[in-house]
Image (spheres, rainbow, N blue to C red):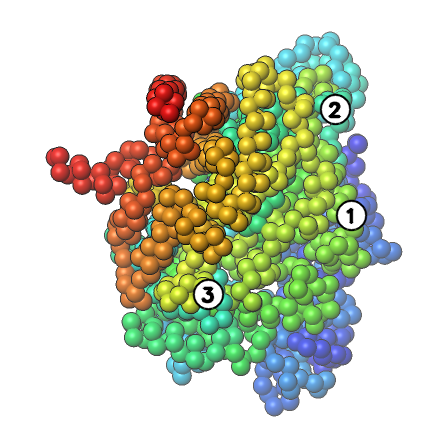
Amino acid sequence: MKEYRTISQIAGPLVFVEKTEPVGYNELVNIVLFDGTIKRGQVLDTSDELVVVQVFETTAGIGKDSGIRFTGETIKMPVGRDMLGRILSGGGKPIDGGPEIVPEKRLDITGAAINPYARGSPNDFIQTGISTIDGTNTLVRGQKLPIFSGAGLPHNQIALQIARQSKVPGSKEAFAVVFAAMGITKEEANYFMQDFERTGALERAVVFLNLADDPAVERIITPRLALTTAEYLAFDLGMHVLVILTDMTNYCEALRQIGAAREEVPGRRGYPGYMYTDLAGIYERAGIVKGKKGSITQFPILTMPGDDITHPIPDLTGYITEGQIVVSRELHRKGIYPPINVLPSLSRLMNLGIGKGHTREDHKKVSDQMYAGYAEGNDLRGLVAIVGKDALSERDRMFLEFADIFENRFVRQGYAEDRTIEDTLNLGWDLLSTLPVEQLVRIDRDLINKYHPKFRQAGKAEG
Amino acid sequence: MEVKTEKAKSDATGVLKRIAGPVVTAVGINAHMYDVVKVGKEELMGEVIKIQGENIIIQVYEDTAGIRPGEPVINTGLSLAVELGPGLLTSIYDGIQRPLAVLVQKMGDFIERGVSAPGLDHAKKWEFKPLVKEGARVSPGSIIGEVQETNIVHRIMVPPNVKGGTVKSIKGGSFTVDEIICTLDNGAELAMMQKWPVRVPRPVNEKMNPTVPLITGQRILDGLFPIAKGGTAAIPGPFGSGKTVTQQQLAKWSDAEIVVYIGCGERGNEMTEVLTEFPELEDPKTGKPLMERTVLIANTSNMPVAAREASVYTGITIAEYFRDMGYDVSLMADSTSRWAEAMREISSRLEEMPGEEGYPAYLAARLSEFYERAGRVKTLSGGMGSVSVIGAVSPPGGDFSEPVTQNTLRIVKVFWALDAKLSQRRHFPAINWLNSYSLYLDSLHDWYDKEVSPEWNVIRSWAMEILQKEAELQEIVQLVGSDALPEAEQITIEVARMIREIFLQQNAYDAVDTFCDMKKQYDMMKAIRQYSDLAYAAQSAGVTPQQIVSVKSKNELPQIKFIKDYKPALDKIQAELDEEFNALRSAA
Ligand SMILES: Nc1ncnc2c1ncn2[C@@H]1O[C@H](COP(=O)(O)OP(=O)(O)OP(=O)(O)O)[C@@H](O)[C@H]1O
Ligand SMILES: [Mg+2]
């Protein structure tokens, strides 16, 4: 392979190389330092005169004397069955002291888009054992459902509880976890690793670690390596794969850094204008393919800068993912775990995975009614602060009360408490029965007669 | 408009000079703006979007990874065009009209590149039935025959860019879309397929004023903010507020004859949902599967961005083609913001001077050109057809002051403002009744008078007034609490709540409530009005608001939504309302 020594400029993570043979766009580049170390990069712009290379590691040590080798192919990831149980760096190199991965295949890390016509419809209900998810924001296999959190909130505990408890009731199919850390601290990473080890999940996991002190630009490829692995496990080996990506905020910062280095016209708050498309290239790699056994379900975690949901990172994510689980500082302060605020949370695929034949026929309506009740009660809290409880009507007081018990009984649960969907729905009815029946305007009479505790018991007493 | 013929080889082939993402530069070809070119050894499809001295700048509709300077570029000399003819209905295409089902056969479950696939099936035979005889005079746009495509009749027309003349020969029978079925005395040979460049609007005889509503079965739309057939509407809203669900509801239930649904830069799973759901749903009018009247364009967020830019043009051209046959077509574009972002991305690669928020300066022009292709028209053949356009807008951070929303609102006549506050309460459709508007109310007034009831327009204004009044009262309630309101006002609050919860809220996922015809809408609103009239009368007669609000029979009203044959139940409730109020008044 020909080696060039024609670097003309180095700026941030970018290296400019002159007078090369024709080089392919997006081609993998090896940069050889004077001591023989090799750094990897990728071609961002190629023409007769100049090639722009984005380096995935720190550019420290790269100089005009460094050698540039164009590999003639786009970045590929060696994948194989024996990746399960392994810990790799954010760039895909083993860091657990184990042997190199024996590749069964080498796959392009960009990943082609699933043809929408080939997609299978995601409708297998996943029971996470958490009421605020199963009951009101139900997750299905093949969904991408991010956790929107803030600094210092227990999103990691929630993600782990989901990873630990998730199951498709009645199914015993092979599953795997792919965990990609981007710029999180060693301590956070340990927290995940210890839990994986303790529960035995590590055997079924592939871990990619790019920590806070690892090069920021490497974060650009970490999620792509993870998803390439996930696609292999899901669509070649037929496993149901849960992918946890944390923290997407750090990924976006790296993206912004590269945009700035390329002197691009910045979009909102300095993030590149193509960030939507870029993130879609990651998040859309979830789903089911018709006629194939496996599935990819994604749990990206991101911390909203300043708890602001309109910040471009959560905003663009929300526009791509199929809903979001929002972790609330206010509930956390009240000492409620998991502090999931259901109001801004949403699962868009919920309707495909619930109801008769999936969970229970009353699921949708119970969920809607609880939302409406909680939303109304929550609004009234603001009013009470101004006018006092006495100025409220009878009806208002009931809804105010409902908001409290909803938080304390439905939202609050233990870190190891694994509720079945039946438990969750029955709990929902118990809470709704504190409201007068005529206030349950979103539920059909038939369902009320069948499931409402008052009628359930009356029915039993008669019969 | 005559299609250009292929150029001489010498200047039709050049070489690539630079590749930077979806935009590449070639030299050595003689190209015109918007010519379609084949890029690189794999012959990826692209389109010329800028000419700068020697440099021909091309946007490529497929991924450009691995392509090198020096690879060849071939100019086809043709503009980006779609194939129009039998076989469009029930199809699902990418942004440049490649059938996704064919792509699965050719390259598997993932979209690879370098595969071309024509928009129509050229092998399939269709039963063509002539509608004109030899010797008949035909002109551009004339209908010369028909094909039973699905349950929809596909009318075969003289292409708008072919000169009229006398029919020399025409034959019925089984033909492919390429076979000649008709010749004219001027030498023109016609097949069932025609091609049309997507960036050029298809000509019409005359644009007419819309006077008929597009009935959607969605109460807040038909009832409060209707769109006309041939009209334009925008649905802006933050993520998760209900743009896609609303668009899909319209695609399912609106009384258009043909639906073109463009998934422009959105989710793959949403298109799958349409693909699995539509064949199973029935058109409430014809009882036939909804898929049979539908054409889908799916260029999801992770598919190439240049093809996303093209997808809205592909969609609207197909819509115009069916309009020309005399159909009422409705087109949904979800989301026009992703289209605008594709423009922005390409523009920034061209290093054009950015306008507001990085969007190109021609954003407003492109948006208005697009919406101008909507309309109720007299077609070239003298019939009436329409294209209604409903565009979703996805403003960053849900802030409507951004350029795409603002430029869209300057053009469209109907504004359905989605509101995150409502969707978080699970008030669906989360359309804000105070901010939304329809500028078609006047032109549709007569239709509602005639087709629904002369009372309808009155009752609609009444409902809007109550909602407006409630908003004002809510401000007071926020300060003093609801019990401190005067008695009449307490009733207004209650009636407004009923309008919101019973009439406005509509669950797209309930088997019955998902679609509500105008008759039922009117009956429901009338029942609420009846309660309101009785309530105010009772209040003046000295009945307390407590008693009025606790009238039992009104609690049954919300259930009407979920009942298909609601009339007996509603009559019963209305009779009971009368009785209960009578009793209250005589007791007072
Ligand atoms: N009319 C409706 N009836 C019931 N539920 C609805 C309705 N409209 C919206 N929803 C609920 O809101 C969710 C989000 O709606 P939708 O996917 O249409 O949002 P969107 O505005 O298209 O968001 P994005 O911009 O992210 O695509 C749906 O999954 C559904 O749960
Ligand atoms: Mg949407």
Structural crowding at the residue carrying mark 1, measured as other residues with C-alpha within 10 Å and reported as few (<14), some (14–19) or many (≥20): few
Using the rendered image, report if marks 1 and 2 lie on a common chain.
yes
Q: Which mark is residue B362?
A: 1
Amino acid on which disc 1 is placed: Tyr
Residue at numbered disc 3: A329
Chain hosting mark 1: B
Q: Which mark identifies residue B207?
A: 2
Residue drawn at 40 percent across, 78 percent down: A190
Give the residue type at disc 3.
Arg
Name the spot of residue B200 as percent of width and height, x first.
75, 35
For this rendering, which residue is in front, B296 or A124? A124
* Chain letter of the residue carrying label 2: B
| Residue at screen point 55% across, 45% down | B476
Where residue B311 appears, as percent x and y from the top left, is 64, 43
Is tag 1's residue or tag 2's residue first in the polypeptide sequence?
2
Q: Quadrant of residue A358?
A: top left
Nearest to the eye among marks 1 and 3: give it.
3
Depicted B160 relative to depicted B427: above or below? above
The residue that appears at 67% across and 11% down in the rendered structure is B132
